[in-house]
Image: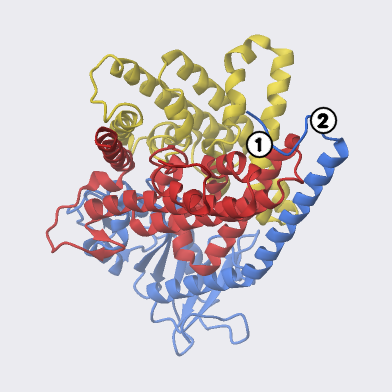
Amino acid sequence: MPVNKASNTDEFVKGLWRDNPVFIMVLGMCPALAVSNTALNALTMGLATSFVLLMSAICVSSLRHFIPRETRIVSYICIIASFVTAVDYLLQAISLELHKSLGAFIALIVVNCLILGRAEAFSSRNRLVPSVMDALGMGVGFTLALLSIGAVREILGAGSLFNVPLFPDGYQTWTVMVLPSGGFFVTAFWLVVVNWIHQRRALSP
Amino acid sequence: MSDLSHWSIFINAALINNFVLAYFLGLCPFFGVSSKLDTAVRMGGAVSFVMLVASVCAYGINHALELINAPYLRIISYTLVIASTVQLVEMLLRKLSPPTFQALGIFLPLITTNCAILGLALFQTNRGYGFSQSVVYALGAGAGFALALVLMAGVREKLDLASVPALVKGTAAALVVAGVLSMSFMGFAGLGA
Amino acid sequence: MNGTPALDKLPTSALAMYRSIMVIGALCALMIVTVFNATEARIARNREQALAAAVNAVLPEARVTVPVALDAAGALHTADVLPALPVFLGYDADNQLVGAAITGIGMGYQDNIRVLYAYSFERQAIIGFKVLESKETPGLGDRVETEAHFIANFEALDAQLDATGNSLANAIVPVKQGEKNNPWEVDGITGATITSFAIGNILNDSASEWVPVLEANRQVFAQAPAQEGNRGAGE
């Protein structure tokens, strides 16, 4: 790939596929598996995480000359935890139902290694615009990954997508898919698919 | 307030709602250090220890926050206080008990901001556990985490010797193993209820 | 590896560290407080609406509902502040006491389940049921909210008191699906045994506690208190 100097579009696009947070970097797996039992939960969780990712990237990037190296981790954690608290309350204000179904996992966005990882590895050493593009790309990539896991689990496990039934009555649901073990299996399946595509590309240039 | 017996809290946290296999908490160390049995045992010990410290901290913080009526500080103070307490404990261990530090020390910084730790603190608050209940919950969660980690490491050591297709090798294979473990842990449902 | 490119190798002064932590702390505090203030009223209203809708769903004949609570001495009085597990008395259009909506909580499969159920004074039975909060597995445990035969349990679930008036004549017991023979048994759901049994047990625990209290105070609260404090559930 002819990458001399990464353009802003490049920073965005890399999160979607080449450096997809879930399938390639295997970061932030905990929420990816825990709340992906329905497509709607997966989408909400993805958006909430993306919001925190984006906002903390903006803060970290614009404060990067101000924060000394010694205090950077505690500062990042502080910033991330504040935005997570904000998302927690905003979501409760928008829809109590949705907040209930995600439960404590909204609060657990704080310890999603993806966010701290991007703050440390990217936003703290790059200007505002590339940082925003990076965060957006990672956020969209994360949301898409969550959605693809959630959609498979909901279609197979409950016979519906976004609560819309897909099959006629009498469809035998794959109960295992909505159970925790289904989360492991579907993620493993997607990882194999991604690996397979990579392998084919490597073979045929 | 919750009036569950200590035994049922312990069984529930360790087996039925195992933190790794049912709540998907702490997956990073779970996949990261589960390839060798020896490291898995030590990591399990370290996580249990940090969970205990975190649970006691969270109980204290929650009371303090209720006193000043500031629930909105919960997330931020849990994260910061737990992280700094663990660092403090790490320094103390290094001074007071070098052998323990040798065994657990290197893992401690890795797990301070682990989701299993924060998850434990949040769950015990949500369920309104009292002090002794919180401690038992932390012990159960730690035991469950260690158990899952050791089982996983045992399987993965054997898996290294088997011929696995290149496509599935690595994380995907580990995920499938975790899925099967998780399914078998479902057999504990109803225990201790 | 650790290189913020622009920084030189000089150690940062303590002042700079303090300053950065202070400023970031202040910014974070500002943001948290702003968001909390902006959303607090809305969240409280959402909660109230959800609860009012639930009360209305389990006890539809009630026109007016009044929250009540036990004080430290064990006496029942109208509550000004809703407790964690609120209990409401329901009055019909003629201001006559018809029933109570009671919140119960207990451990389900995944986490605590919080339910609201209605007790009818006239029929001495549980006549309505709704799950307020649960994290049960979608498609399995959450069938307690949709499965028709399970919901049918709560059209008339016997909850009369024994002769002493201090406990239920027959404890509410969950049984396996299809094995319900008595009006105080809760017909479970195959495939969601744990959740459906948990709900039977929650109802038993909560009803054992509240039904004797409510029956003992039935005469005192027979008429709707005319003044304020009426929490409307569908006026």
Instruction: Give the color of chain A as drawn.
Output: red
Q: Which residue is mark 2?
A: C10
Q: Secondary structure at mark 1?
A: helix
Look at the picture and state if A93 lies above or below B113: below
Quarter of the view holding residue B11: top left
Residue A48 at x, y percent in the picture: 50, 56
Name the residue nearer the viewer: B55 or B34. Answer: B34
Specify the chain shown as blue. Answer: C
Residue C11: image quadrant is top right
The answer to whether residue B46 of the structure is visible from this angle is yes
> What amino acid is labelled 1 in the image?
Ile
The image position of residue C196, as x and y in percent, is: 31, 52
Q: Colour of chain B?
A: yellow
What whole-number distance in Å separates the C-alpha atoms at marks 2 and 1? 30 Å
The label on residue B82 is 1
Task: Count neighbours of disc 2 (C-alpha within 10 A) and say few if under 14, some if 14 to 19, many if 20 or more.
Answer: few
Q: How many marks?
A: 2
> Which of A36 and C203 lies nearest the eye of the viewer?
A36
Expressed as whole percent of the image width and height from the top left, the position of residue C54 reads: 43, 71
